[in-house]
Amino acid sequence: MSELSGFPTLKPAIITKVNIGDVQPLGVMHNGSKMTHYGTPSGTIESVPGYEPAFKATVNFGADWLSFDPDGQFGRIDLRGMARTENGSSIDFRYVGVIRMAPEVHKIFDQDPDMATVPFGFATGSHTFVVADPALKDLENSVFVSNGRILVEESGLVVETRQSLVVASTAMN
């Protein structure tokens, strides 16, 4: 069997943490999915060491329009938010993904007293950015994919994503 080539690689790039605020059930949609609006009023977005352009930003508004498939097996993430960098520039960030609703994940959404932080491996997604600072323009022109998890902390729930830059292959075959 010949070696597979032409596939992209991943480079660790960004860690985002958004705090979950108010929760508003929106009901059943026309396709049978159940939608809930989760406010994400605060958090952080930060590049990892070695990734350029390096930046830190504070989330100042956001929400996830999360829908759950009719069979309850998967959730559909649709998070949108605004953040401000340390130099005052705005970042519009978006995250779409899929979360497998394993029993330990269900405990969090059901607010079960036994709920606990779940590891990476249940949620994957993609991220896009629109930036005000020209120094961060590469964020707009790149593709990012992620693993996500939900942290159960004394102060509440936190959604963490670890995003990698998709690096194109230069193989000829």
Image (cartoon, grey):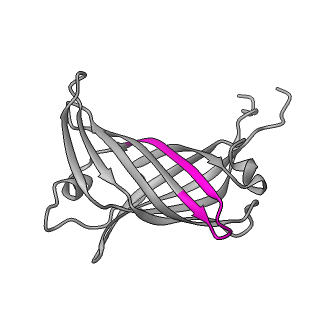
- Residue 141 lies, with reference to residue 62, above or below; the image says above
The number of numbered discs placed on residues in the rendered structure image is 0
**Does the stretch in magenta take in 95?**
yes
Q: Nearer the viewer, residue 95 or 74?
A: 95
Residue positioned 58% across, 54% down in the render: 163
Q: Position of residue 102 (x, y in %)?
A: 26, 48
Q: Is residue 72 left or right of residue 149?
A: left
Quadrant that contains the N terminus: top right
Quadrant that contains the C terminus: top right
**Does the stretch in magenta take in 97?**
yes
| Quarter holding residue 133 | bottom right
| Quarter holding residue 20 | bottom left
Residue positioned 22% across, 54% down in the render: 109
What is the span of residues highlighted in magenta in the rendered image? 83-98
Single out the residue that lies furthest toward the front.
88
Single out the residue that lies furthest toward the left.
113
Q: Nearer the viewer, residue 61 or 65?
A: 61
| Quarter holding residue 7 | top right
- Residue 29 lies, with reference to residue 53, above or below; the image says above
Specify the principal SS of the magenta part: strand
Q: Is residue 96 left or right of residue 84?
A: left
Residue positioned 39% across, 61% down in the render: 41
